[in-house]
Amino acid sequence: MNKATGRRQLLTGAGAAFLLSALEGCGAGLLRTRNTTPARRLQLPRLRAATDRITRITVCTRPFRAEGPRLDVERIGDKTIVHNYGHGGSGWSLSWGSSGIAVQKAMATGARDIAVIGCGALGLTSALLLQRAGAEVTIYAKDLPPNVRSSLATGVWTPDSRICLEEHATPAFKRTWESMARNSFQAYQNLLGLAGDPVEFIDTYNVRDAAELNPTARVPADGRPPFADLQKELIGDLSPHSDDYPPGSHQFGARYLRRNSLMMFNLSAYTRMLISDFLANRGRIEIAEFHTPADFASLRQKTLINATGYGARALFNDQSVIPVRGQLARMIPQPDIHYGVFYRNVGFIPRRDGSVFQVLGENDYYGFNDDTTMADRAEAEHAVNTIVGLYA
């Protein structure tokens, strides 16, 4: 298989952002999968979507670093700073595994009164894992969920979404990434079936028109370097085989479908659960704003985990952090819809806390180095109308 057309066998996402996993080959080639098309005709509940059902448009700024997440230890004055940021579109997906690494480094200092800077995906998981390791933890943050960037993520399992450039995916990086991905995946299995469905699996359908069955490579044509593609290579065993549906076996006319299973996070319920668990374990949250690392001098803790995400660019003057813009059109949820759809570079995810529609773009560079946060209504309506068009 061409590497570019084999990217992201589990559909990838923002906050993160997701990409379409390509349908391999054309016509007969489409049917050469390990799972044959079920004999029973696929009939999905009809999605009731329209632009007048959009309740909100949100924009997330993902923190991408070409070399991958920053997980090193830095000494500033009398403080030991353990960094845990720069995960691109993979913050939620890798949070437990990445935070596990940061917590191990923080506990190695011998401190048991530890501060966490930031209250997003990486901050909350770092704080909870510190508590489980026996530390007393205080979260310091300017904003709390839902007013943090992590709350604006797409909410799907995308562990290699803009995680680093391919040139930086060294054997050592791959080992670290695989450990983070597997540990996070296992942690999420323990959250399945809980009240509020903080985590659940859904079916997703990649839909292709006949003319798209031989897609061009999903890499930039202008010479920009490709992003690392790690999921299929290193953790392919975590993904069930896909099912293919040719024209006539479903309700979408002369199109080809590929069904996959995808883990989804209902971020409102999930974030509320994380905060409740942290506070129940005698954790403390204090509202504080830091403009430079020198401001940490006012904290009593000597060991800190820095989980500020894109905010680290300004706080630490880290120009290696590049913004990647992602916009969601949020819509009234539909209780009977438990499947996602990806069609013509647009994705739909049926989150319980509000369905989301997103323009994905043709490659990973969509939204790259764009820090604008103003909502684009035309883009939102295009996303909704593209998916609605399948049901016409």
Image (cartoon, grey):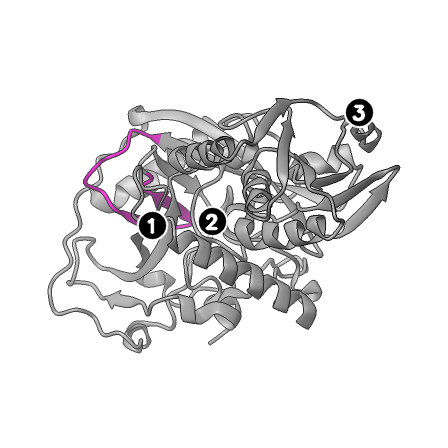
Q: Is residue 107 left or right of residue 285?
A: right
Name the front one of labels 3 and 2: 3
Report the residue that reaches farthest toward the left.
40
Q: Which numbered mark, 2 or 1, is in the foreground of this view?
A: 1
Residue under the image location 11 percent in, 65 percent down? 40
Q: Which residues are magenta?
A: 331-351
* x, y percent for residue 360: 47, 46
Distance CA(mark 2)–CA(mark 1): 20 Å
Is 348 inside the magenta-drawn segment? Answer: yes
Percent across and percent down for residue 94 are 54, 53
**Gap in Å between the C-alphas at discs 3 and 2?**
38 Å
Q: Secondary structure at mark 1?
A: loop
Quadrant assignment, res 25: bottom left
Mark 3 or 2 closer to N-term? 2
Q: Earlier in the sequence, mark 2 or mark 1?
A: 2
Labels 3 and 1: the sequence-earlier one: 1
- Identify residue for label 2: 13
Please report contact status of discs 3 and 2: CB closer than 8 Å, yes or no: no
The image position of residue 138, as x and y in percent, is: 63, 31
Residue type at mark 3 is Ser
- 315 and 332: which is toward the camera: 315
**Disc number placed over residue 298 in the picture, else none:** 3
Question: Is residue 347 depicted above or below 329 in this figure?
Answer: below
Question: What is the number of the mark on residue 259?
Answer: none
The answer to whether the residue labelled 2 contacts the one labelled 1, judged by CB atoms less than 8 Å apart, is no
Disc 2 residue type (three-letter):
Gly
Q: Locate residue 241: give its quadrant.
A: bottom left
Residue that carries the numbered disc 1 in the rendered image: 192
